[in-house]
Amino acid sequence: MKNHDDEIIISYFLRAGVIISVSFIVLGVILMFVKNGGDGFTLSQLSSYNYALNHGIDSKSLPLGLIPEGLRSLDGLYFITVGLWVLIFTPITVVFIGWISFLEDKNYRYVLMASIVLFNLFFAMLVVPRFIG
Amino acid sequence: MSLIFILIKFISILVGSIFAGFIGSLTGLGGGTVLVPILTLFYGIPFIFAAGASLISTIATSAGSASAYTRKKIANIKIGIGLEIATTTGAIVGSLTLVFIDRHALIWVVYVIFGLVLLFSLIPTIRKIGAEVPPEMPPDWTTRVFQLTGQYYDEHLKQTVKYKGVRWWLGEIVMFFAGFVSGLLGIGSGALKVLGMDWAMNLPMKVTTTSSNFMIGITAATGSSIYWYEGYINVFIAAATAIGVLIGAFFGAKVLVRISNQNIRWVFFAILSFLGFDMVFKGLHIINFIITFSLTIQFFISIAISIIMISALYIHTRRKEWKEVK
């Protein structure tokens, strides 16, 4: 990378992603304890691993489409969900910034390589779940 | 009253995660390699939840500490993204394999594989112990084609280190396995990534550990989204580990830039060997194969074996140093 400011930008993005994510998670944990649970489950159900495992209380029981409603009703579980998904998207921004900076450098070999990485990431997010679900 | 117990449970997972994050960041492994054994062996958390919480927390470690390293311009982002082609592909294959194993109730296999991966990741560590900057190798065609050059300022050596990577193709092969292991075991598989860059591509240790740190996040993001849809992420556990691992990683990153590479590798070895043996034993215990004694006895046997191994290795490397002095 010719432009060395990219490293600073990447560093800011990573930091921002982590801070946003952790804020949501911390808020969600507080809400979860204050309201004694979330998403229709009590806190003791959520916190006992084997009960959760046997009763399907996991990420599968938290549809991403319900996030807006969950946030509006101050449901702690959905705050944590948002936090975790911000976390998942954070490293992707690095690849994206890399992609842009390779394009600026006219380093097309690396533009192609970064594109393949982005393709893999979205393949895992959008295509794979349809097959395993 | 039960609320207090749940709070204590949450905090105890948090503390375990802080420990895992600290060690993970210090070694460039990512917190997961330490976190999964801790969660399964000491907290009794089912493997898939441990793997799910660990993989997503690994992103936090990776992003948190990578934001510090990229600023120092030690990590090589270009080489990292190039190698991510293989790790993300591997992560997809790996997490789908875990889904298959879990659906067929073969989870003991994953314990054994986990332990073995831990133990085998020690081999490159043992062999190259003490090498701060790798011996120079003549650049090959991949050095030019994939632009595998770079430089960084080493605070410990107090000089700018220039380096040239070689054997890009071999790096990619190792990285595919690193990604596979990451998706299969819910860890960042930093050890394999370090192996890929350190051994295969002959990059300096500082560059490999810091680059692997930000690569771990991208690999883990791939696996995490598959884990999410398959229901491997328990929000209660994941919330505690994500925060804990991040706190641990923060302190680990502070220490890493001031530590000599040799120290990193010793910490690496001591903890991993114990956790590795204990995971193998636990896997075999599940199917009552050979090992049928209780978990407590397993625990002490693992400690004994790892103490013997560490001491033997320590004496072995020290003897080399003593010979050199003479």
Image (tube, rainbow, N blue to C red):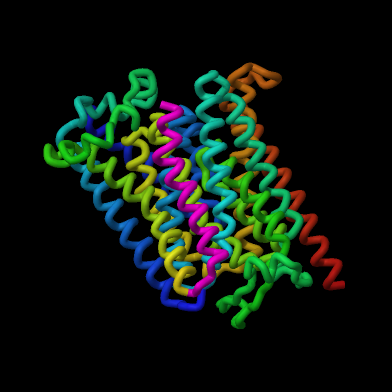
* Residue situated furthest bottom in the rendering: B159
Q: Position of residue B127 (x, y in %)?
A: 76, 56
* Most foreground residue, B160 or B322: B160
Image quarter where the C terminus of chain A lies is top left
Residue A9 appears in the rendering: yes
Left or right side of B258 for A31: left
Left or right side of B273 for A101: left
* Most foreground residue, B180 or B72: B180
* Residue situated furthest left in the rendering: A73
Magenta stretch: dominant SS?
helix
* Most foreground residue, B94 or B309: B94
Residue at figure coordinates x 52%, y 53% from the top left:
A116
Count of marks overlaid on the render: 0
Q: Position of residue B73 (x, y in %)?
A: 50, 73
Left or right side of A25 for B233: right
- Judge whether B77 appears above or below A21 on screen: below
Residue B37 appears in the rendering: no
Left or right side of B285 for A105: left
Q: Which residues are magenta?
A: A105-133
- Residue A114 belongs to the span the image colors magenta: yes
Residue at figure coordinates x 72%, y 53% from the top left:
B124
Q: Position of residue B261 (x, y in %)?
A: 63, 65
Q: Quadrant of residue B212?
A: bottom right
